[in-house]
């Protein structure tokens, strides 16, 4: 694993931990101001930090955080000098979602510029 991949994994794991802790500043950290997200519930597309933040209000109406609330189960990272993407499986309770994240390196820091969450299936 090279330095950029390790840094990206650290950003994404910190984001997931912030969700489990219901830590809104931590959730919003390491995102670009022009974040675009495609999500499972409406709105299907959110643009910008204000809209992105509002999606978490909806999420936390149904999730109380905790150890099973938002776990990256599987993750693959591909990076270049200034852009990267990661894809994998996200566990939310008994459900599994597909996760794709696009990142940009800004001032030496990896920032999440795009998220795409899509529902896979419930586990029996």
Image (cartoon, helix red, strand yellow):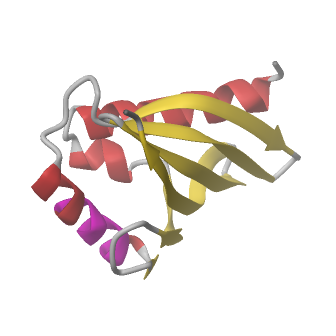
Q: Is residue 108 above or below residue 66?
A: below
Q: Is residue 77 above or below residue 115?
A: above
State the extent of the magenta-drawn residues as a range: 50-57
Camera-side residue of 75 and 9: 75
Quadrant showing the C terminus: top left
Could you tell me residue 42's position as x and y percent?
33, 78
The image quadrant of residue 2 is top right
Q: Residue at x 30, y 34 (%)?
A: 93
Could you tell me residue 64's position as x and y percent?
12, 40
Asked whether, in this view, residue 44 is left or right of residue 81, the answer is left
The image quadrant of residue 83 is bottom right
Asked whether, in this view, residue 48 is left or right of residue 89, the answer is left
Camera-side residue of 79 and 107: 79
Could you tell me residue 9's position as x and y percent?
61, 30
Camera-side residue of 64 and 81: 64
Asked whether, in this view, residue 70 is left or right of residue 31, the answer is left
Q: From this viewpoint, which residue is outermost toward the right? A: 80
Residue 101, magenta (yes or no): no
Quadrant showing the N terminus: top right
Residue 51, magenta (yes or no): yes
Q: From this viewpoint, which residue is outermost toward the front? A: 124
Q: Main secondary structure of the magenta part?
A: helix
Q: Is residue 93 above or below residue 24?
A: above
Count how many numbered circles sit on residues in the image.
0
Q: Residue at x 40, y 35 (%)?
A: 123
The image quadrant of residue 19 is top left
Q: Residue at x 64, y 45 (%)?
A: 110
Could you tell me residue 121's position as x and y percent?
46, 48
């Amino acid at each position: 694993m090279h330095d950029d991949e390790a840094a990206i994994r650290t950003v994404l794991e910190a984001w997931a931990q912030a969700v489990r802790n219901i830590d809104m500043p931590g959730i919003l950290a390491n995102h670009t101001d022009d974040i675009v997200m495609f999500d499972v519930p409406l709105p299907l597309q959110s643009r910008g930090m204000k809209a992105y933040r509002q999606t978490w209000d909806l999420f936390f109406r149904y999730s109380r955080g905790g150890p099973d609330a938002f776990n990256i189960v599987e993750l693959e990272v591909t990076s270049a000098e200034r852009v990267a993407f990661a894809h994998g499986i996200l566990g939310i309770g008994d459900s599994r979602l597909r996760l794709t994240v696009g990142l940009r390196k800004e001032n030496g820091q990896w920032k999440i510029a795009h998220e795409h969450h899509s529902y896979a299936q419930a586990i029996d």
